[in-house]
Amino acid sequence: MKALAEVKQVQKNVDEFKLGPVSLSIEAGTITALVGTNGSGKSTLLKLMMNLAKADAGNIKIHNMFVNGLNEEWKTHIAYQPQTMIGWDAFSGKALRDFIAPLYPAWDDQQFNDIIQAFSVPLNKRFGKLSQGMQQKLILALTVPRNTSILLLDEPTAFMDIPSKQKFVDLLIEWMESGDRAIVMSTHQVADIMKLADYLCVLQEGKWMGTYEKETIQHMYCQYWMRDALPSESLPGEVSREGNQFITSKPEAMDAYMREHDLHCVNQKTLNLEESLSLLLNK
């Protein structure tokens, strides 16, 4: 598939925090979720992709253009929704729309109005007077209609109510159907990941732990309950054990081991996405 963005061996040091090296390929038709604990570097990676922070090593390309090069045409291909906006408090939604729309040749005013109506955002109210959830909805309405091929979203549903989150999911699914597009979003919301993500880029305290297909993580760990006491030796892929139960990252090897050693399982289950992510992030 066509790579719309490429992150290669990128590193960034901020005081005592070190991000990377991170490598990531963003292909058309995919949604990639950046997942990790607080302070793992998700927002920093998005800022690096927007060239709002300078990488200490590695390089980033958007539509085959280096983001730190002289050619800034790449900016017309990407839209970014940060967690918070600085300098918007004094302006109404209408004023912000009138300022932003002319900067994007492909701006879709009908889509802007549809999002405003769907989320019931008051355009005559100053941004600083809106609730955090309503601010998020307005920022979304001012980001998606830019009609770029890449959309970067930083915790886009953190303050949204449940009905609004479903509208948000529907909106992004519809947006993805309009051509060769891709989304990169940081999120702590497992529901967002389940409904939207194709790939998960996992970060832990700045360390890139890999990028996985969602289905791979969903089938990564299996929990067993044994009839008898566990052997003292480490089991294939063993992650943890307690009493007569254990978790393994190699269920096929474990099944073969049980047959070979005549061990009997009374119950087993594949861990769900949230449980698997928790184990992966606590490695």
Image (cartoon, rainbow, N blue to C red):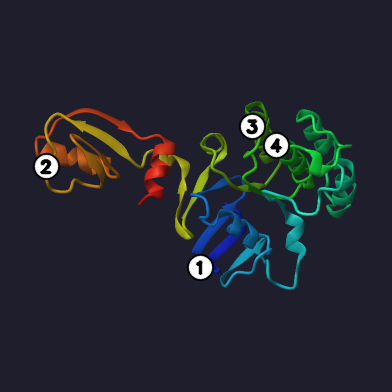
Category of crowding for the residue at label 1, using alpha-carbon neighbours closer than 10 angstroms: few (below 14), some (14–19), many (at least 20): few
Q: Position of residue 245 (x, y in %)?
A: 22, 35
Q: Is residue 274 left or right of residue 53?
A: left
- The residue at which mark 3 appears reads as 165
Residue 90, x across and y down, in percent: 86, 48
Q: Earlier in the sequence, mark 1 or mark 3?
A: 1
* 246, above or below 82, in the image: above
| Mark whose residue sits in front, 2 or 4 | 4
Tell me how far mark 4 sits from mark 3, CA to CA: 10 Å
Are the residues at dot 2 and dot 4 in contact (C-beta closer than 8 Å)?
A: no
CA distance separating discs 4 and 1: 32 Å
Q: Residue at x 90, y 47 (%)?
A: 98
Q: Earlier in the sequence, mark 2 or mark 3?
A: 3
**Alpha-carbon span between mark 2 and mark 4:** 52 Å
Which of marks 4 and 2 precedes in the sequence?
4
Which structural element holds mark 4? helix
Q: Amino acid at mark 2?
A: Pro
Mark 1, secondary structure of its residue:
loop
> Element under label 3?
helix
The residue that label 4 is drawn on is 133
Residue 85 picture location, percent across and down: 74, 51
Q: Is residue 34 above or below residue 196?
A: below
Left or right? Give the position of 268 relative to 110: left
216 is higher (above) or lower (below) than 5: above
Three-letter amino acid code of the residue under disc 1: Glu
> Disc 4 vs disc 3: Cβ atoms closer than 8 Å?
no
> Hey, what amino acid is under mark 3?
Lys
Q: Which circle marks residue 231 in the picture?
A: 2
Q: How far apart, in angstroms, are the residues tagged by discs 2 and 3?
A: 47 Å
Residue drawn at point x = 13 percent, y = 48 percent: 233
Q: Which residue is mark 1?
A: 16
User: Of marks 4 and 3, which one's residue comes earlier in the chain?
Assistant: 4
